[in-house]
């Protein structure tokens, strides 16, 4: 039964891959939602810009018509001073309206440029997440392979406990297994037991919870197993 509940380091490695893939998919869905919102905003701004351009065109046409009317009045010498002044005042108002439309158009163009820039930033963020995710995956793969090769380390999960198994500790029997059982609850490590027993296990547990450096603790445990084996061989 114990063998059925154990998960070797390859299963742990696959779990790392699944977690990284799940995290990346979550980020991509979020960024896709943001990109959809930004795209919709860009489309609305484009519609407003087209509308503003059309209004500007109509205003320019009115201005040109008024200029022609003023010119005709001057040429026929039938202009009425008050009428010409009224036309000129209306022309001034239209010029003010046109100026406002130009300013509005410039603001909308600026907003559209910002939307395009945001889309580029989101695309860049997705790319960075993919690169970082791949880097972490490669790093995890490399660490597992190095531990197995140089420390003879294998990691298994039994219920809620991690079991670290060492081989290549004893020079006389390299295949002999040395084990330590570890659990983690509420950010607190507990070194449950070791095989063979290590007298300094409580001290190692205290140092581990103080430093939080699990790798250093595992390396130290292996060294203690080596010393224990060397001492036994000398006796």
Image (cartoon, grey):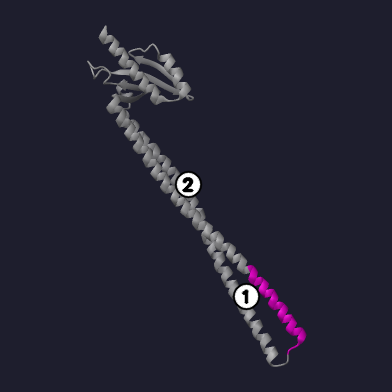
| Quarter of the image that includes the N terminus | top left
Location of residue 162 in the rendering, given as x and y in whole percent from the top left corner: 37, 23
Disc 2 and disc 1: Cα gap in Å? 44 Å
| Mark 2 and mark 1 residues within 8 Å of each other at the beta carbon | no
**Magenta segment: does it hold 178?**
no
Q: Quadrant of residue 161?
A: top left
Q: Is residue 39 visible?
A: no
Q: Please tell me which residue lies in front, 99 or 150.
A: 150
- Dot 1 surroundings within 10 Å: few (below 14), some, or many (20 or more)? some
**Magenta segment: does it hold 85?**
yes
Q: Please name the residue that numbered disc 1 is placed on.
A: 59
Q: Which dot, 2 or 1, sits closer to the camera?
A: 1
In the picture as drawn, the residue positioned furthest to the front comes out as: 234
Q: Is residue 163 visible?
A: yes
In the picture as drawn, the residue positioned furthest to the bottom comes out as: 76
Q: Please name the residue that numbered disc 2 is placed on.
A: 30
Q: Quadrant of residue 68?
A: bottom right
Relative vertical location of residue 134 with respect to residue 174 in this rendering, above or below: below
Majority secondary structure in the magenta region: helix
Relative vertical location of residue 128 with respect to residue 153 in this rendering, above or below: below
Location of residue 52 in the rendering, given as x and y in whole percent from the top left corner: 58, 68
């Amino acid at each position: 039964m114990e063998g059925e509940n154990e998960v070797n380091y390859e299963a742990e490695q696959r779990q790392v891959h699944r977690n990284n893939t799940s995290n990346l998919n979550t980020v991509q869905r979020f960024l896709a939602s943001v990109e959809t919102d930004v795209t919709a905003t860009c489309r609305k701004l484009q519609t407003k810009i087209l509308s503003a351009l059309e209004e500007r065109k109509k205003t320019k046409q009115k201005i040109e018509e008024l200029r022609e009317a003023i010119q005709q009045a001057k040429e026929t010498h039938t202009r009425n001073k008050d009428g010409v002044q009224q036309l000129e005042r209306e022309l001034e108002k239209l010029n003010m309206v046109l100026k406002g439309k130009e300013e509005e158009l410039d603001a909308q163009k600026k907003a559209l440029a910002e939307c395009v820039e945001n889309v580029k930033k989101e695309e860049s963020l997705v790319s960075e997440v993919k690169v970082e995710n791949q880097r972490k995956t490669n790093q995890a793969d490399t660490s597992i392979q190095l531990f197995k090769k140089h420390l003879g380390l294998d990691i298994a999960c039994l219920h809620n406990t991690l079991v670290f198994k060492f081989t290549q500790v004893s020079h006389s029997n390299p295949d002999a297994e040395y084990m330590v059982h570890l659990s983690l609850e509420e950010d607190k490590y507990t070194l449950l037991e070791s095989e063979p027993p290590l007298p300094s296990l409580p001290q190692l547990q205290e140092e581990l919870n103080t430093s939080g450096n699990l790798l250093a603790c595992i390396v130290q445990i292996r060294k203690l197993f080596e010393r224990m084996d060397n001492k036994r061989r000398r006796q």
